[in-house]
Amino acid sequence: MARKIRSHNLTLFVIFNLADLIRFERMDGNTVFTDTKIIHKDLTANSTWSQAGIINVYNPVLNSITITDDLPPNAPQNLSVTESSVGEHPSLSWTANTEADLKEYNIYREDTYYMGVWHKIGTETSSPHIDTGVSTSHHHGDDIYYKITAIDNGNNESNYSNEEWIEARIEKIINGEENIATIKEYALNSNYPNPFNPTTQISYQIPENGFINLIVYNALGQQVAELVNQHQSIGKYSVKFNASNLPSGVYIYRLHAGEFSSTEKMILTK
């Protein structure tokens, strides 16, 4: 087993051999020294080991080394999501990783149409990331969640960062397994969760461009919310309904698009 060591720009390998020795070699294969005394030392990632006389074999000044190992980077820290100052889009920022061999960050988003499914939406070499596929300009947005990972030069991926969210809307939700051509008909889906308190997601799809109207009514037929009232292009959509100011009961939501009209029932329980 080999472990990478980085110290003063000198890259070595720690090699465990059958004789229970640790042999330090340069990248060119030349042996620097061998030692039997530290075979049982804890050489875990980011741990520090020092021993007088041995390290001085290749650096008289240095008396310690850091074992970095070829392990994944640390998970990115302090992820936050705010509205971008340039355009109405979510802006992700985080504390930069300190690994010397860090290559990039993977950006993940939870698409609300596919509940609980995370999609990689891009990469960045540094903070921040602007998600131009999402708009923060809507009054009735969805809870859009984000998390990121760090990638090193060996393509090792860290654990996920903390999750953060912002109220926004994904205008069209098409994942990598399908495309617009697969949407052949209108559909209004059952909300999730149902029953709910106080928010739920309502998703639908439209097979052609047109003016879309999505309205929520109480059991008496009175309008209590207008969630969508605009022109939209072909695609799949999801919108959040917040009923925090409404009493418990049965509610009806209706989607109207051209000649298509469909209704579904949902139950608010407080």
Image: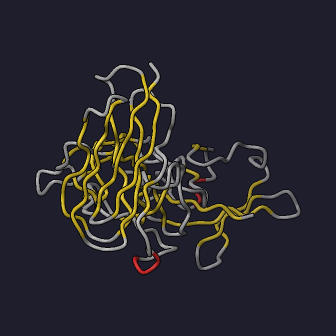
Q: Residue, x 45% and y 45% (percent of image)?
A: 161
Q: Residue, x 42% and y 59% (percent of image)?
A: 100
Q: Quadrant of the N terminus?
A: bottom right
Q: Give the colour scheme shown.
A: secondary structure
Viewer-closest of 177 and 187: 187
Inspect this view and state whether residue 111 appears: yes
Q: Position of 176 compared to 53: left or right?
A: left
Viewer-closest of 229 and 192: 229
User: Residue 31 falls in which quadrant of the image?
Assistant: bottom right
Where's residue 228, x and y in %? Answer: 24, 50
Where's residue 51, x and y in %? Answer: 63, 44
Q: Position of 78 compared to 40: left or right?
A: left
User: Residue 95 falls in which quadrant of the image?
Assistant: top left
On screen, residue 36 above or below 196: below
Q: Quadrant of the C terminus?
A: top left
Q: Residue, x 41% and y 66% (percent of image)?
A: 186
Where's residue 153, x and y in %? Answer: 49, 69
Inspect this view and state whether residue 98 appears: no
Number of numbered discs on residues = 0
Farthest left residue in view: 86
Farthest right residue in view: 19
Where's residue 107, x and y in %? Answer: 40, 58
